[in-house]
Image: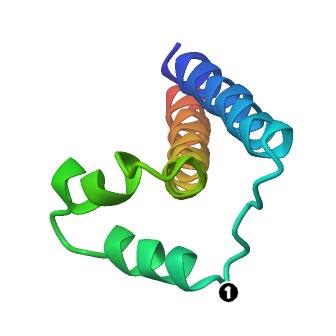
Amino acid sequence: MEIVLTNVARASLEELLADYRDFLRTRDLAEWDKTHPHARRLSELVRTPGATYENFRKAVEHPDPAIAANAIIGLIKVTSYLLDRQIRHLEQAFVKEAASANE
């Protein structure tokens, strides 16, 4: 059940990502690529040990909608990556548990 619910969360994030990309597109705003200076800064912040919302507040709540939307897109991508890792781990644990039960 945990695998299913984690996959649902992952799919919901993909929908949210599409919504933010639509937001940028309909306003003729660019999505940052990973070499953009703000994207690089966000990447640094994501790697901050013990990071909390406070680390990202300035970008997420920025008055410029392009900065706020791109920051949120970056955080969605990181969260999706982490969920993918979690799903793989859950699947491996499930297989290992099933193999142990069959012994």
Measured as percent of width and height from the top left, residue 32 is found at 69, 68
Which structural element holds mark 1? Answer: loop
Colour logic: rainbow
Label 1 packing within 10 angstroms: few (<14), some (14-19), many (20+):
few
Q: Residue 16: x, y in percent?
A: 65, 29
78 lies left or right of 26? left
Give the residue at x 55% y 47%. 65
State the residue at coordinates (17%, 54%).
Answer: 54
Question: In the shown orientation, is residue 82 left or right of residue 16?
Answer: left
Q: Is residue 80 left or right of residue 60?
A: right
Q: Please name the residue that numbered disc 1 is placed on.
A: 35
Judge by depth and name the residue closer to the eye, 96 or 9.
Answer: 9
Which residue is rendered at x = 15% and y = 64% of the image? 50
Give the quadrant of the C terminus.
top right
**Nearer-the-camera pick, 69 or 100:** 69
| Quadrant position of residue 48 | bottom left
Q: Is residue 19 left or right of residue 88?
A: right
Number of residue marks: 1
43 and 11: which one is in front? 43
**Three-letter amino acid code at the position of disc 1:** Thr
Q: Is residue 6 above or below residue 51?
A: above
Between residues 45 and 87, which one lies in front from this camera angle?
Answer: 45
Is 100 located above or below residue 46 in the figure?
Answer: above
Q: Is the residue 63 above or below the residue 103 in the image?
A: below
Kindly give the residue lying farthest to the top in the view shown.
1
Residue 63: x, y in percent? 41, 48
